[in-house]
Image (cartoon, helix red, strand yellow):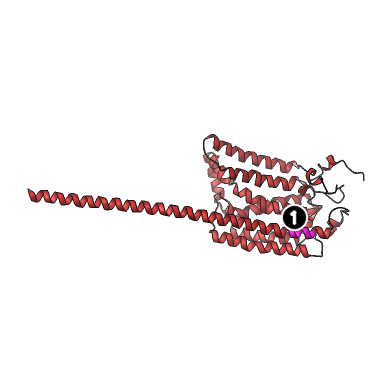
Amino acid sequence: MPLMPVAFLALQPLHAKPDDVIEPLVGWRFVTAWTSPWWVVVPLVLIGAAYMTGVYILHKRGDKWSLWRTLSFMVGGLGVLAVAIFSFLGVYDTVLFWTHMIQHMLLNLIAPVFLVSGAPVTLALRVLPKRPRGWLLKFVHSWFAKIVLFPPLTFGVMIASPFVLYLTGWYELTLRSDFHHDVLHIYMVVVGCAFFLPLLGADPQPYKIPYPLRILMFILTMPFHAFLGVIIMGSRQLIAEQWYLAFERDWGVSPLRDQNWAGALMWATGDLTMAAAMAVIFVRWIQESKREAVRVDRMLDREEARARAAAAAEKGLDSGETQNRSAKDAT
């Protein structure tokens, strides 16, 4: 089969197959390998445009919106999603296990943290008209949201999903089927957002989890990612062996070394992400404790001021009554 031009390879299907002509991922290919599936480009552009429209409306009427939230959602959230899907990670995500694993971590852990930190629901509630805002509030507090965002459920799904994906035939199915591959990407983002929203998000939600319990959930999640990463890294049996060997690559690392790298990436990235999230939670806990202390101090100051005013008024009343009695006695 003749070699295709590099320009054409950059536009090859999102999910490469063993029968495709695959250009080696070396040198500048890390920079020039891009893909742009319209079914992903269009939703990302529409979501980004909707968010920035909301920010523009707020600024136009003189209201403030945090620059950090905007950068978090647009750059850390949508930007990371774009890199995970459009860059060489998306071009080679079915060719190399380690590129898939980076993509997995970006879609499931990194991007959701920034997406929920951008507070898109709060932004929508501040700019939507009265009726749509009421619909959104009803949805946020609906039975469906209470089920989807139920912390024990999201915690269990977050832990179990990688084990089910890599230790069963599900992963190979997502490699062979474009439909299942795309569904997996959506699933990763949704599960990540559902897990991190009650823990890190500033949006209205059905559950308010105490900070110690949030930290505990992160601590309990870390060993599972590390354990699965070690299993993948140390396994001598290739995951999706027939698929990866069918490429017959004569470039890059060997399939077994490729799998070792993937396991190490899951271990390191999972632990680092959870540790960073715990640090954020701890800082927020301290900040909220300080705000609560200030609020309590102000409340006590107001109560003390009311007590002094009441005491002064009572003293003034007693003094007035005494003067009245003295005047009557004198007459």
Residue 154 located left or right of residue 238: left
> From this viewpoint, which residue is outermost toward the right?
1
Please name the predominant secondary structure of the magenta segment in the image. Answer: helix
**In the rendered structure, which amino acid carries the disc numbered 1?**
Met
Which residue occupies the foreground of this view, 188 or 311? 311
> From this viewpoint, which residue is outermost toward the top?
60
Name the residue at 73% across, 53% down. 102
Which residue occupies the foreground of this view, 188 or 262? 262
Q: Is residue 78 above or below residue 222?
A: above
Q: Percent position (x, y) of residue 313?
A: 25, 50
Q: Percent position (x, y) of residue 124?
A: 57, 42
Q: Is residue 241 above or below residue 141?
A: below
Q: Percent position (x, y) of residue 167?
A: 75, 62
Q: Label 1: few (<14), some or many (≥20) within 10 Å?
A: many
The reply to whether the magenta stretch includes residue 155 is: no
Q: Helix or strand or loop: what does disc 1 sit on?
A: helix
The range drawn in magenta is 259-265
Q: Which residue is mark 1?
A: 101
Residue 103 in sight in this render: yes
| Residue 277 location, quadrant | bottom right
Q: Percent position (x, y) of residue 127?
A: 55, 39
Which residue occupies the foreground of this view, 161 or 269? 269
| Residue 215 location, quadrant | bottom right
Name the residue at 78% across, 49% down. 178
Name the residue at 60% across, 49% down. 117
